[in-house]
Amino acid sequence: MNTHRMSRCLVSLLLLTSAVVIGQEERPFNVIKISTSDEPTIAFRKMGRLLVGEGYELQTTEPTLMMITTKVTEKKYGFLSMGRIALRFAVTIDEADTGSVVTIAGKFLADAEMFQRWMKQFTGVEASLKFDAEAQEIEERGMSGSPVRASWNAMKEIAEKYENGKVTFDAK
């Protein structure tokens, strides 16, 4: 094979490889896992108490299925805490070889009240945002100070406050 033909093949192979790599976007993390030596029932109680202690009201607690969901809770964020996000977390606890794994996922809605006031003021239309229909999945992305990043940070703070746990991030 002559060198010109070989170099053309090599360039084509490099272009094909880079196109495949570029096309494979990594999903941002959207789940936080806590590995703990706590038995699942202990982890369930600790997680429920932690959420309540951090100001989240529990909507459901299902000890048979080891699931907890919070009610939609508004938190302030950003410069002078002027922004508001509405958050809801879903927590599951699974048995593991050495204890249990607590998995936290969530949804958020940013500045809904501000949007509703703006719509009424400038258009006269009552905007009705429903959390379940409008909320976005919490993911590890967004700039510092953004509602997207603030929602991730709120979920991460909960995980990091779980005593006797190792926190990891995952994409589901």
Image: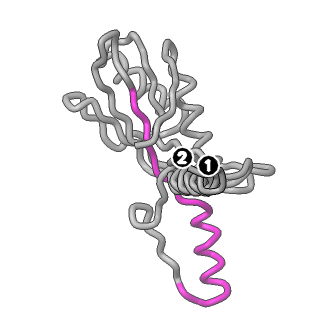
Looking at the image, is mark 2 or mark 1 earlier in the sequence?
Answer: 2
Q: From the viewer's perspective, tell me whether residue 130 is left or right of residue 120.
A: left
Q: What is the magenta range?
A: 102-125
Quadrant assignment for the C terminus: top left
Task: Kindly state the secondary structure of the residue where label 2 is placed.
Answer: loop
Q: From the viewer's perspective, tell me whether residue 83 is left or right of residue 21.
A: right
Residue identified by numbered label 2? 28
Q: Is residue 8 magenta?
A: no
Residue in view at x 49 percent, y 58 percent: 136
Q: How many marks?
A: 2
Q: From the viewer's perspective, tell me whether residue 111 is left or right of residue 128.
A: right
Residue 85 visible to the viewer: no
Q: Is residue 116 magenta?
A: yes
- Residue 103 percent across, percent down from the top left: 40, 32
What's the amino acid at mark 2?
Pro
What's the amino acid at mark 1?
Arg
Q: Nearer the viewer, residue 3 or 63?
A: 3
Residue in view at x 64 percent, y 48 percent: 149
Residue in view at x 39 percent, y 27 percent: 102
Q: Work out how far the residue at label 2 is from the one at label 1, CA to CA, in angstroms.
A: 7 Å
Colour setup of the view: one colour
- Residue 74 percent across, percent down from the top left: 56, 51
Residue 125 visible to the viewer: yes
Residue 141 — which label? 1
Q: Most extreme residue toward the bottom, as rendered?
A: 123
Task: Classify residue 4 by image quadrant.
Answer: bottom right
- Residue 139 percent across, percent down from the top left: 53, 47
Q: Nearer the viewer, residue 108 or 19?
A: 19
Residue in view at x 45 percent, y 41 percent: 171
Asked if marks 2 and 1 touch (Cβ < 8 Å), the reply is: yes
